[in-house]
Amino acid sequence: MKWFFTFASAVVLLDQFTKKLAVLFLRDRGTVTIIPDWLKLTYAENNGIAFGVEFASQAIMILLVGSISLMIALYVLKSGNRKTLFLLPFSLIFGGGIGNLIDRLTVGRVIDFIHFDLYQGTIMGSWVSLWPIFNVADSAITIGACMLILLHNRIFPEPDTKAENHVR
């Protein structure tokens, strides 16, 4: 469990540090272009979840994120699996959830600032921003979830049923 909490703490610390920098340098300035027509740092506050979807009050969101984070920690603890490949994706998701939970508790919204400006414009008469503004916590959650999907068979190997049943 030491590695689980070490990885998760690193995510939370990096997330909170970068958000403090965003507040300090971007809140009043708005946007800083890093790579023209591609990558910007844009200060934003988000009440919702992934892609800014709002579906519940902040109180419900805090309870939901807190419950999910607690369930992840309990699952990892009860699993007994201490392999890095198992711990890493869960610690990324847990750390990202805690990072955004801290924002919800302290600011009332999640602070976002990484902005891939892939396309902004009108499509069929509607204004579209192709990619939402996000943060380090969102990135950690996404990477952890992708690891669980892409490496599922290595993270959760199937038990050898032949050995268990003594079948030859």
Image (cartoon, rainbow, N blue to C red):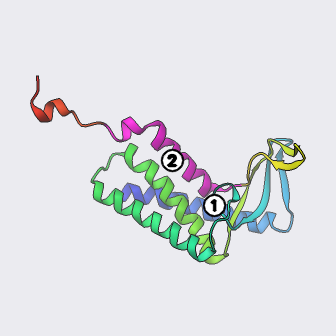
Give the quadrant of residue 51: bottom right
Label 1 sits on a secondary structure element that is loop
Residue at the (77%, 63%) spot, across then down: 44
Residue at the (74%, 47%) spot, across then down: 131
Marks counted in the figure total: 2
Q: Which residue is most to the front?
A: 124
Q: Where does label 1 land, which residue?
A: 49
Q: State whether residue 68 is above or below residue 165.
A: below
Residue 115 in view: yes
Please state, as top left, top right, bottom left or bottom right, where the N terminus lies in the image.
Answer: bottom left
Label 2 sits on a secondary structure element that is helix
Q: Which residue is most to the top?
A: 168
Please state, as top left, top right, bottom left or bottom right, where the C terminus lies in the image.
Answer: top left
Q: For the residues carrying marks 2 and 1, which lies nearer the camera in this image? A: 1
> Which three-letter amino acid code belongs to the residue tagged 2?
Ala
Q: Where does label 2 land, which residue?
A: 145
The x and y percentages for residue 145 are 51, 47
Give the quadrant of residue 38: top right
Gap between marks 2 and 1, in whole Å?
A: 15 Å
The x and y percentages for residue 14 are 59, 59
Label 1 neighbourhood size at 10 Å, few (<14), some (14-19), many (20+)? some
Which residue range is magenta in the image?
Answer: 134-157
Q: State whether the magenta stretch is mostly helix, strand or loop.
A: helix
> Which three-letter amino acid code belongs to the residue tagged 1?
Ile
The x and y percentages for residue 37 are 86, 41
The x and y percentages for residue 112 are 71, 60
Q: 160 or 18, which lies in front?
A: 160
Is 144 one of the magenta-colored residues?
A: yes
